[in-house]
Image (tube, grey):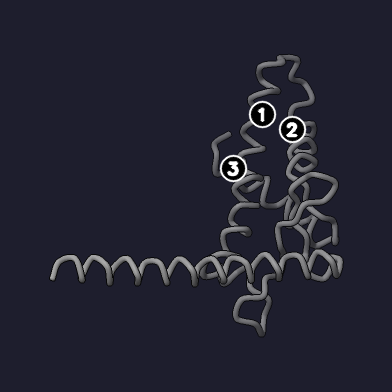
Amino acid sequence: MNESQLTAIVETEVEAALAAGTPVSKYTVRNQIVMANCETTDSDFALACAHHAIGDIVGRIVRKVKQSEDEEPDPQLVLPGYKRLQQRYAVERDGEPCLVRLEMMTRPEVRAKALTLRGFAQGALEHADELDAWADAMQSAAE
């Protein structure tokens, strides 16, 4: 089985869980997929490799959602009728990173996500101001 096939299995599992309203924990999804597909494996090495490979794929899916919070969002992730509001967000539940459909997030999770995004915005504005100041200083030094 190649990586694109593994990715398809993981994406199917993630989408099914989200459609059912279940938060997607990286570790839970990884373990479910490995156990469902490695029943006859008695090699600790093979199981460790499977956990690692599937965990990496789930991690990429979570990072894709987190990245779209910072940058221009993937159009497939945006809630219809909105410019940036996503259908799902990466949150932490019980100490684990999870993907959760927006309508399944708690009000405190939504508020925390909004606060985080405002922090990103403030940091980006400060960064832009520093770049402008640096450019001005470099131009003044050159004159």
The residue wearing badge 1 is: 50
Question: Which residue occupies 51% across, 70% down?
Answer: 72
Relative to 43, does residue 47 appear above or below in the rendering?
A: below
Residue 67 figure quarter: bottom right
Residue tagged 2: 34
In the rendered image, residue 94, in percent from the top left (x then y), is placed at: 85, 46
Tell me the tag on residue 5: 3
Kind of residue sitting beneath label 3: Gln
Q: Position of residue 41 (x, y in %)?
A: 74, 19
- Asked if disc 2 and disc 1 are in contact, CB closer than 8 Å, the reply is yes
Of residues 72 and 135, the one nearer the viewer is: 135
Q: Quadrant of the N terminus?
A: top right
Q: Position of residue 143 (x, y in %)?
A: 13, 71
Q: CA distance from mark 3 to mark 1?
A: 13 Å
Vertical position of residue 46 compared to residue 141: above or below = above
Q: In the structure shown, which secondary structural element does the residue marked by tag 2 occupy?
A: helix
Instruction: Give the image location of residue 83, x and y in percent.
Output: 60, 81
